[in-house]
Image (cartoon, rainbow, N blue to C red):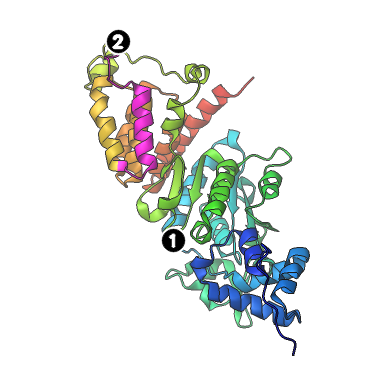
Amino acid sequence: MKKRHPVQSLGMPTAQDLLCRWIGLDPGTIGTAAIQRAVATRMAASSVESDSEYAALVARDEDERDSLVEEVVVAESWFFRDSQVFEYVRSFAATLAGLPSRGPVRILSAPCASGEEPYSAAMALLGAGLAPEHFLIDAVDISRVSLERARQARYSANAFRNADASFRDRWFRRLGGGMVLDESVRSCVHFAWGNLLEESFVAESLSAGRAPYDILFCRNLLIYLTPAARALMEDAIQRLLKPDGLLVLGAAEPPIMKGNWIAAGSGSVFALRRGVPTAVARQDPASHARHARPAATPAARVALAAPVPSAGVEPGVPSLDEVLSQAGDLANARRHSEALSLCEAHQRRLGPAAELFFFMGMLHQSAGDLDRAEGCFHKTLYLEASHEEALLSLALLAAQRGDAPMAEKYRQSSARVLSRKAPS
């Protein structure tokens, strides 16, 4: 047997370097020993004995690169993993689907592993009464082996470890030693290979005039990435998700997500939405004029038990925009209670303001206090009946409580607002 030649220290990347660079993997998250075993396995399979020779092979041969990825990537998932996530997604999607001007609800699952996650989303939406034409689900992964398994949609008992497996009897049939998913669910999900860190992936996802996604599942990926790769992934998420969209992460990932995000519901949901008021506070003056809220009437001021604000702004006292900006920064830093305290401290001084009440409602909702959130959203509508985000938020809260008629009422109201805003 030939003697293996170590890689020369001439700046030449190793196979591990190339792999980690391409998929953004932080070696420390799975251990360098695991990567070294994967490289050794592929070197033996390729009949390559030199480290440098194998690195060159990975650099020029996409098939070998993919084979090395398969040795490293562990596609571990099961149906309805964290069931409360899918309950929230179902309510969110049903609310959007009730708005005819928005078209089908667009969902992306990336990475999708062997299909358990996107298929769970499809079953949840079909079970909620949505027709297949009401939503579109794209599912992407870097593992071609996992994608092929997803397309076959045949699963072992390990995929049904969820305690409530009633969905299995409804959507699956037994075949041999496994369970095969019904075609009515399989046809709702479109699988494709893709590397989420490549610019071409984002460009192609938004090509041909396709809108960004309403819901984006990106669970348990960020925790495995290097800081540089994580920054690229966060930028991709910002571009792929609609401004009012829902981002679903893994349990450990919301605290490490950078940017303007706040919890969409209780902490166990692991879902985030953009901190809308911060963006309003920091927009350009022309845009701010378009979003300016009508002044509250005297009756409204009395009803909300708030004093009439002074005509001028006292020196050193923050304005409404400044309060929203400061509170948004606190929320982005996951200091939600401090953000809420800041808003409450300035609310009486500033007087009734639709955006301030709306932001307070989002903060209460993120803390799981649905009653106070609902109260704030109602105050928002009292001041501005056409506040679309408040109507959608109330529809979501009603759906969460199981009040379908009220959820539908708010959806219809939001649809009317959208129709009036649509260009003629």
Q: Is residue 393 left or right of residue 44?
A: left
Q: Say which quarter of the image contains residue 298.
A: top left
**Residue 83 screen position, x and y as percent:** 44, 61
Amino acid type for the residue under numbered disc 1: Ser
Q: Residue furthest top?
A: 311
Quadrant for the C terminus in the image: top right
Mark 2 to mark 1: distance in Å? Answer: 51 Å
Q: Say which quarter of the image contains residue 65.
A: bottom right
Q: What residue sits 30% from the left and 10% below the top?
A: 312
Say whether residue 332 is magenta: yes
The label on residue 146 is none
Q: Secondary structure at mark 2?
A: loop
Q: Are marks 2 and 1 in contact (CB under 8 Å)?
A: no
**Residue 282 screen position, x and y as percent:** 45, 26
Residue wearing tag 1? 83
Quadrant for the N terminus in the image: bottom right
Write down the region rendered in magenta.
311-336
Q: What residue sits 65% from the left and 71% below the top?
A: 70
Q: Is residue 338 left or right of residue 395?
A: left
Q: Is residue 125 above or below residue 320?
A: below
Amino acid type for the residue under numbered disc 2: Gly
Q: Secondary structure at mark 1?
A: helix
The label on residue 312 is 2
**Residue 252 screen position, x and y as percent:** 42, 58
Nearer the observer, 235 or 261 = 235
Q: Residue furthest right?
A: 60
Q: Residues within 10 Å of mark 2 (few under 14, many from 20)?
A: few
Q: Is residue 288 visible?
A: yes
